[in-house]
Image (spheres, rainbow, N blue to C red):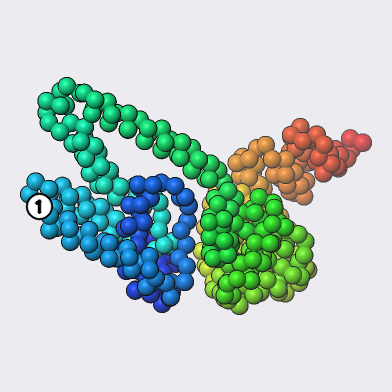
Amino acid sequence: MITVRAQTGVQAVISVDAVPLAFRVMNACHSIVFYLWKMLVPVSLVPFYPIVHPETSAWTLPHVAAALLVLLVSIACFRWGVGKRAYLSAAWLGYLVILAPVLGIVQVGSQAAADRYTYFASLSPFLLFSAGVAALAFPTAAAARSFGFGGWSAVGLCGVLVAGLAYLTVGQIAIWKDSTTVWEHVTRAYRDTSLIAHTNLANAYRQAGRVDEALREYDRVLAVTRPHAVPHEGKGLALLDKGRVDEAIVELEKAIALNPRSAKTYRYLWLAYDRKGLADEALAAAQTAVAADPEFAEAYGNLGIRYGQRGRFEDSERAFAKALALEPGNLQYLANLATTYQRAGKLDEAIDLYRKTRALDPRAPVYAINLGNTYLQKGMVLEAIAEFQWAVELQPTNQVAQRKLAEAHARLGKR
């Protein structure tokens, strides 16, 4: 219940229209068998098993065969798993009950299955397996006390299993090195079949600075799937990184046409318009981002910048104050609000905020320079000199700090 509630907030609970009920039921049966098989033979594990064509794949042979197998095992356990063999029905029922919430009847996320869902559920079949090994190795209490050949054989078998599983674990850990490695592994397993996997790989490439590879993946996604906002948005950002602003605007506008409620996309479009010098369009994009998500701090920050560029300082103050209220610890919003106060002539308010930024990050020369500038503007030359001197000590090659320090000395006649 907690999972469903949390994921509903980020629209990760999938509707029945997107993933039909028949597929959910048949995929649940398939997952029951799939997980048991992966427990028995834990090879070819993939971080993400995508749902592929849910509208047509419910009644495929693997799904039907899995459903029949689940039915037969259930009948066998509850018919013969009574009395001295009650452990059979207990193990099967335990496995099913623990696994039930994550079988996808209520579909959370876009995966058909996930290895992590077996962590608790695997206890039941593994206990049954361990009990079976113990019973074969020590059929009687006397055999257990003697710890003969059967006991050592069991120990040897367990040692081989542990060594083999440890080897597989080391290999599996390597897949999780970083996002790029994860999604490269998934796309090798499900090439050109999962929009999510290829999009996530493209995003990982872009974040790693591998922009050309990112563009290749975005194009692959857009070529093999129906139109979707996410790859268009990602491609737009990659094109921005390449400096191809006009093409980036086209992609971001396509993303908005497919998902007009995405505040994040409007924020990226603001950035593209701003780089292009389209002031009116940039302002409109920032305003739309705020309207789409009133709790989106970055959108208010963008709006504050745009208002400040137009000299609308009161509007800029309100926007930065709202961004700061949403993210009180954000130094950038604090500094931007201070700059707005300075430009509007509210020097005391600007000095108060610059002092706060200076205190929060005393090793950043830019905050010392900003505070010094405001002191200088207010005629507090000695205080300005102290700030510029500190900035020079922090970064001796900073030409702005050197120039401002010279200007402050000149104010005092110290030629």
Q: In front: 373, or 227?
A: 227
Disc 1 marks which amino acid?
Val
Q: Where is residue 40 shown, x and y percent of the image?
A: 35, 47
Q: Is residue 11 above or below residue 89?
A: below
Q: Residue furthest front?
A: 149
Q: Position of residue 327 (x, y in %)?
A: 53, 54
Residue depicted at x 47% and y 67%: 52
Q: Which of these two is toward me, 408 or 330? A: 330
**Point 86% across, 39% down: residue:** 406
Q: Considering only vertical position in the picture, is 383 above or below 53? A: above
The residue that appears at 76% across and 70% down in the rendered structure is 246
Which type of secondary structure does the marked residue at label 1 adopt? loop
Viewer can see residue 135? yes
Viewport quadrant of the N terminus:
bottom left
Q: Measuring from the top left, give residue 273's x and y in whole percent.
A: 73, 69
Tell how many labels: 1
- Which residue is farthest top? 146
Q: Is residue 6 left or right of residue 358?
A: left
Residue picked out by circle 1:
82
| Apparent side of residue 132 relative to residue 176 in the rendered image (left or right) | left
